[in-house]
Amino acid sequence: LRPSSSPPPPRQEVPVLKVAERVRLRKMDRHVTGSDLISLGVTRTEVAEQLVSDLQEECDQQELSLRDRRQLELETERLSARLEHSRSQVNVLQLTLDESKGHCERLCLLVGKYESNVTALRLALTSCDRAIEAYDLLVSLLDAHTNNEKCAEADELRQLIAELKAERALVRNTVVELESLVEHPPPRPPSSTSQARKLDLETAVLMQELMAMREDKCELRAKIYLLERERENQELKVASLQSQQQAHLATIQHLQAQLQDADTEELDADGRESRLRERLKEVASTLERVSRNAELRQRQASELATELKT
């Protein structure tokens, strides 16, 4: 009997490792409220992503150091002041534009009055020309000593002259008295529109100056903050120099002790003593240089602190 051939065991597939892909969380159009959590739960992907993104933002804000947070606040305040200054400038320009529009409208009315006066003066000039012609005819008739028929014609001319004079007077009455462009208009009560507009313009200018002062104040506060950080750095440098100075003093004392011990040794130690003396001089010169640098930095730090206080 042949042994029964058993089926080969199934091959086990090796699981393939997959690298998780980094996905950028998407935010919802609106914030998640308590009612949304009660009604929807956390089963929806959008709700979970919104909660995770809010938590990540809070963690990022907490990770900011105190200096970075202070600097961010100063920068935000400075930008807000600059925005308010720009808005005040826009208000001033808007009021100036409105005032210019009012001036243009008044000038248009004045030009219309000038045009009407010019038309009336042209009509008056035409009437004067016709009156002069009538006067010339009347003078010629009187010089000729004509008969009664011509005297009747003279009466007609006199009547025509009277009509022309009346027409000229009527035209003169249509002439409008114009105000001068140079003279200022008489003062109006504060309740008028122009006075209120002028007050609005002055208020806008004052607001613009105030916003400029606030912007300068924010910039000065930012400069003071940077100077304070610089002063802290200088103080740290001075402290490190002082520690180096103490270390050099300890080295000098140690070398002096070695020098005193070397005095009791044999004559062969003369070379060692001279080397120690040279080293001692080098250390002393280094210490003096470090001391001068420390004093200079201390003086600069004190002057900087005095400038910040003033």
Image (spheres, rainbow, N blue to C red):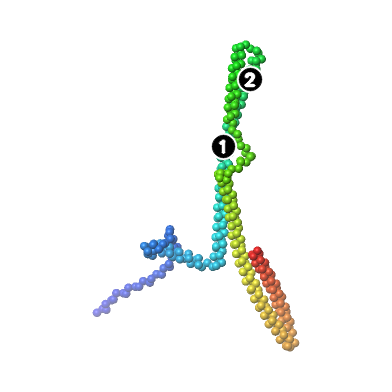
Of the pair 127 and 85, the residue shown nearer to us: 127
Task: Identify the residue shown where x is 55% and y is 55%.
Answer: 84
Quadrant hosting residue 244: bottom right
Task: Identify the residue shown where x is 56% and y is 46%.
Answer: 196
**Mark 2 element type:** helix
Task: Specify few, some or many for label 2: CA neighbours under 10 Å numbering under 14, 14-19, or 20 or more.
Answer: some
Q: Relative to 166, is 41 on the left or the right?
A: left
Of the pair 118 and 71, the residue shown nearer to us: 118
Q: Which residue is mark 1?
A: 109
Image label count: 2
Three-letter code, disc 2 = Tyr
Quadrant hosting residue 117: top right
Q: Relative to 76, is 298 on the left or the right?
A: right
One can see residue 180 in this view: yes
**Given contact means CB atoms under 8 Å apart, are the residues at marks 2 and 1 in contact?**
no
Q: Disc 2 and disc 1: Cα gap in Å?
A: 39 Å
Q: Relative to 171, is 283 on the left or the right?
A: right
